[in-house]
Amino acid sequence: MGGSESFPPSFRPAPPSRAATFLLEPGRPPVIASARTFSPAWEHTTCPREERPRGLTRLTGLKMIVIGLDVGTQGVRAIAVSETGMPAAVCREPLPPRDADGLQEGWAEQDPAAWWSASATALQRTVDELRCAGRPPQDIKAVCVTSTSGTLVPVDASGKALRPAIMYNDCRAVDEALAANTAGAGLAQKMGYQFKPTFALPKMLWLKRHEPATYHSAARFLNAADFIAGKLTGEFSTTDTSNALKMGYDLVDMRWPRFITRELELEERVLPSVIAVGSPAGRVHPRASAETGLPASAELIAGATDGVASLIASGAAMPGEWNSTIGTTLVVKGVAREKLKDSDGRFYCHLHPEGYWLPGGASSVGGECLQVHFPDDSYPELDRQVPLRTPTSLVIYPLARMGERLPFVNAEAEGFMLGRPRDRAELFSAYLEGVAMVERWIYELLSSLNMEIGELIYSTGGGARSDEWMQVRANVLNRPVCRPRLGEAAYGAAIIAASQVFHHGSLSRAAKAMVKADRQWDPVPEDADQYNVKYRKFREACRAIGYE
């Protein structure tokens, strides 16, 4: 059955708010940095006052602080900010390496207890750093947590994880994804996406089928951010609309669809209640206060997935505004008035708390191609050669491994190169061009699916830290590309918290007030003309081998 029949909703909407327009901050000088070596001057853990970096000035007159917490796969990052968006403390705590012993190929797991240990340490160091700046813990008014999308944690009634978390990139639930797509065909048609093995719902079904003892012992299935939020508040029963998407929650009717209990036979008791991104979700429990240094008066604000949080931090806040994140892969997300439906399943839509939709998708290309083909090279040196080598004579589809998912779906797709490079600098430059070509293709695809694409593209991630790559992308896209000062998930979580504390529940107003531009790159007309010609050759080469 589809998603037409539903449970009575357990959903609390965010307070109503008015939208606002994001404005760039003019006149700020650029930060010159390599895509691999960038480290902001204020990034540190604890710091004596006399050694405190200039970026962490005493915030006199600004009495309230909010904290964004990003629980990543390699570490936890906390950012404390004021109402203006100025960072007051930034701390990172690494996680132990993931142990893959005994796991099958395509499986990925991590210990949730390690997340909490690192989170508590990062928060305690953040509080200590604020004290160094003369800010007592009582100034901290709210905290918001973001983490990976699709990671699943089964917990008992006390909130204890019953097994290692099944991570966002774990692909074991192939059969269960097929079952979810068959049973949830109505929801898939309504929402315009397909369940994938990496989604949380197929993983829930996999646990029921393959680890029945764990399933029957579970009081709730939670996402990674939900687990950390539960450790902070002592309540392990809630998720947000952003994280709920991959659990199968119906974001149109705001209900858990009936097919989850009827066809998939998952019990209603394991499904968390759902609240809107940016909603109040409890206060810090005294036990968590003792472990983290946060005041028990601090409020927890419902967060979002790391992808959505990064979008918020980018500056893309209003319909028609889009962000490209270049990390290991290329992720494109934006803000739209209407829900995007893609029959090929390349995109899916999160819900903005102000009623907009947040369509997005991920390519398999990205910075990984540089890691694979230039593992021992000096990226700063290669970056300096890029303006001298571009446009190159090469045409590259920069897949580092088999399989593509956006702009086309082909599990057997492989990268290719036409031409012979003169040297490694030209080859490096051509890979930067190749990622930009795929990025342009994705935005053309979005336009063909009736998505509004504004003139300016925002950009975050490691790739955005390379000035040279940003210029190449502006030329290939033939659009201005803008890098924010703090375009990362932890900062996006801080903005979500600030929307409730400082901006009367308006996330778009908070983003407008807090996000500041670092630098904007405009296309160079002569180079853009040459790249128009090269892009046609690139698409023709793709078409010739069936990449469409």
Image: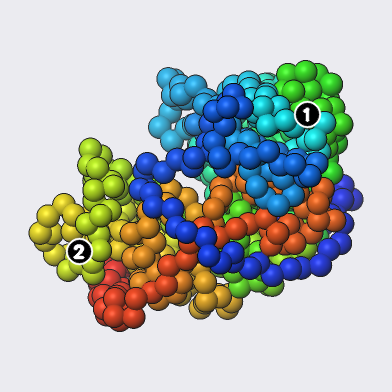
Q: Is residue 412 above or below residue 283?
A: below
Helix, strand or loop at disc 1?
helix
Question: x, y percentage for residue 438?
Answer: 37, 64
Q: Position of residue 193 (x, y in %)?
A: 60, 60
Q: Between residue 500 and residue 264, name the one nearer to us.
A: 500
Please tell me whether mark 2 or mark 1 is closer to you in this view: 1
Name the one closer to the observer, 459 or 282.
459
Q: Circle 2 sits in a helix, a strand or a loop, which is it?
A: helix
Quadrant the N terminus occupies: bottom right
Residue situated furthest front in the rendering: 50
Quickly name the residue at label 1.
Answer: 137
In this picture, residue 527 sits left or right of residue 125: left
Please name the residue shown 63% across and 35% down the image: 89
Q: Which mark is residue 389?
A: 2
| Number of numbered labels in the structure image | 2
| Residue visible at 65% across and 67% down in the picture | 22
Judged left or right of residue 295, residue 124 is left
- In the image, taking residue 150 as reference, residue 83 lies left or right, namely right
Please, what is the three-letter code of the amino acid marked with disc 2? Answer: Arg
Residue 528 lies, with reference to residue 184, above or below; the image says: below
Q: Estimate the spatial distance between the alpha carbons at disc 2 and disc 1, rounded to whole Å.
A: 52 Å
**Precedes in sequence: disc 2 or disc 1:** 1
Q: Which mark is residue 225?
A: none
